[in-house]
Amino acid sequence: MVTEALRRRWMSVLALATPDEIDAVWRELGDPPAYARVRGPEVGLVMVRARAGGTGLRFNIGETTVTRCAVQLAGGALGQAWVRGRDPRHAERAAVLDAMLQHAGRRAELEATVIEPLARARQARRDAATERAAATRVEFFTMVRGED
Amino acid sequence: MRRGFVDPVLGSQRVFRRVLEAMAHPGRIVTLDALIDTPPSLAPASAAVCLTLLDFETPVWLDDAARSSEAVEWLRFHCGAPLIDQPEAARFALMLAPATMPELDAFDAGTDAMPDRSATLILQVDELGAGAGPRLAGPGIADTTQLDVRGGPPRFWDLVRDNATRFPRGVDLLLASGRRLAALPRTVRVTEG
């Protein structure tokens, strides 16, 4: 049984991977299954919203391009992907992988060979960026003045 | 899952133009020629109108026949419109079995100040014919015209007449059959039959 949380995680990992990383796992996969495009891949705009300071009121931070795609495997599963950017190949492959992951037969194998490596790669990218940023961190403090 | 319009952009543009023509000329039968892949319970014309007019901003009400068919998933996927249970809150309503549909005043007729905030009803009927049936007049009809509707709700033309008496409030009707479409907006007057 595919729970929403499980699927949400792998869809997120697939969407947040770089196109090159998707290319690499796709090549490892061997022959892709037979599938039909149901929608797209097509590019559109979405409004990104954020909260001031992470907790404040919601505001529109700006628009970003998104590519979405839906495919259906010969076996019946409907795979979807929404990927930031304008790479139709990324969206289509992510949708196919989403559909394949919904079949119990190959899920464990795909989790190990596709999802986990992509998640690790993303974590590594994040860590590297955090490290670079941390090196330039400035500490502000107030000198204690004498008694007024 | 079936695809919807074979060409989503051109398909919805062509259908929109045809819906506009039908609405501007009440009683005129137009043919929707855009290629479309629909679930079996949905006629190509009703499906094409839904894909063209419904989106995330238009709450839609479906009758029981539509709800119990494959059409629900298809509409949800392609239109992304919220499906709601109260007909009075719907911007659009789709009736696959108009014979058992609710009364027209179950739907939002707008207000005198904002008559455009009213519902548009899509009725999938058995057959639409020109040159027979009651005589229609009103804006968009040069002299009079005739429209024959098979498989509509009982006392259909009385409903259309009552709807016109509420002007400027009221609902607008789209009748779909196969690939054919006709509109009966609230401005239409049924003069005989």
Image (spheres, coloured by chain):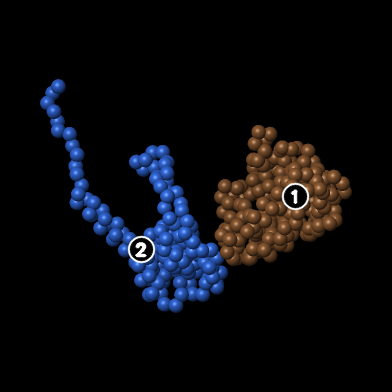
Q: Can you give x and y, in whole percent of width and height, for residue B22 in the image?
A: 71, 53
- Of residues A77 and A23, the one nearer the viewer is A23
Q: Residue at image x 47%, y 68%?
A: A96
Could you say which chain is coloured brown in the image?
B
- Of residues A103 and A77, the one nearer the viewer is A77
Q: Can you give x and y, in whole percent of width and height, for residue A36 in the image?
A: 54, 70
Quarter of the figure with residue B124? bottom right
Could you say which chain is coloured blue in the image?
A
Other-residue count near label 2 (Cα within 10 Å), few / some / many at <14 / 14–19 / ≥20? some
Q: Residue furthest right?
A: B193
Question: Does residue A3 appear in this view?
Answer: yes
Q: Is residue B95 left or right of residue A109?
A: right
Which numbered circle lies on residue A18? 2
Which numbered circle lies on residue B26? 1
> Which type of secondary structure does the marked residue at label 1 adopt?
loop
Q: Residue at image x 48%, y 72%?
A: A105
Q: Residue at image x 79%, y 59%?
A: B127
Quarter of the figure with residue B7? bottom right
